[in-house]
Amino acid sequence: AAAAASTAHSPRAVASPASTPADVTVVVAKDGRSPDGIGGRAYASISDAVAAALDAAAALGKVDVASVRIAPGTYAERVVVPAFAAQCDALRIEPLEGTDASSVTVEHFTSVPYEAVFEAAPGARGVVLENLTIRHGSKSVANNYAVFANVGSGLTIRGCDVRSDTGSGVAAEGATLECEDCVVSNCKTHGVAVYGDLFGQGGFGRVVTCEIRDNGEDGVLVRGGAAAEVAGNEVFDNGRFGVELVDVGAGCRVVDNAVGVGRKGRRGLVVDDAVSDVEVSGNRERP
């Protein structure tokens, strides 16, 4: 554990929101007051701000990007993003421009089962989470995730630090997931899990340039008919395998990763014997 701590790093902050301006912007602040220098109303909860942003986008007919920008602080809530194709093409949830990338923590600890901190609801495509610290605990055996892309949704998570005390960090079921420049660590089960839908079909995950470590089971798991690109990651000190592919769909790529052996002495990279059409190249063993 000490060795892992010495090599760990923080998530890489992604480009300033100013580089991708939003058509609609709604602000969140813990006290519900708009921060100095920012006009308009602020919302005390992220969920209320998401609803307000989508309403504002709908009032304009439809926009390309709606943004929810969060003032520094810790927010204890669960955020479910509904489908929003009629309102906008993308919904970004991110810290206020100019604030530190680690300044916003969103956490949800509950005895209610099946509750992620952030969930892209079925059909919610274009959800983007950037530069957030996300902490989770929920009482359930299945569907126990800090960040969850539900069937038919599309979720991008960039520059975030994710941990689940009870389940997996980031997961998708029959959805499209992009996980980039994140640290996913110290989760009870898997770091990142990409599954097909209930029929064992569909689902795609792109996991790139992340640090995935110290999780109880696999660092990255792809199974149940899903396909994935797993590239350029540091995956180490996980309890089971570093990267595991089981009964996956065609077109998987596992390339240019540094993968450590699991804490139980298991192999770093495992591909099911029944799997075909998988590219595995350029990976190296991480001490």
Image (cartoon, grey):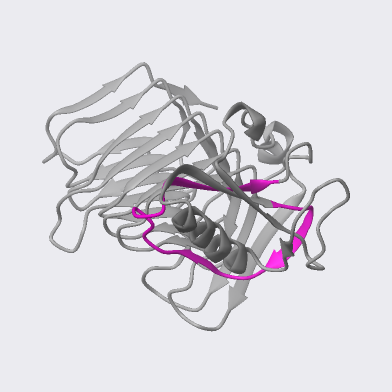
- What x and y, as percent, mark residue 19? 61, 26
- What x and y, as percent, mark residue 88? 42, 48
> Residue at the spot x=69%, y=34% of the render?
9
- What x and y, as percent, mark residue 221? 35, 47
> Residue at the spot x=73%, y=39% of the render?
97
Q: Residue furthest bottom?
A: 111
Q: Is residue 59 visible?
A: yes
Is residue 150 or residue 184 the one in the foreground?
A: 150
- Residue 254 horizontal side relative to residue 77, left or right: left
Q: Residue furthest right?
A: 36
7 in the magenta segment? no
The image shows residue 16, relative to residue 109, as above or below, that is above
- Residue 63 horizontal side relative to residue 104, left or right: left
* Image-quadrant location for residue 266: top left
The image shows residue 112, relative to residue 205, as above or below, that is below
* Image-quadrant location for residue 177: top left
- Residue 158 horizontal side relative to residue 82, left or right: right
- Residue range of the region highlighted in magenta in the rendering: 70-95
Is residue 264 or residue 50 the one in the foreground?
A: 50
The image shows residue 209, relative to residue 118, as above or below, that is above
> Residue at the spot x=40%, y=74% of the render?
141
Is residue 50 or residue 234 the one in the foreground?
A: 50
- What x and y, as percent, mark residue 126? 40, 46
> Residue at the spot x=62%, y=70% of the render?
77
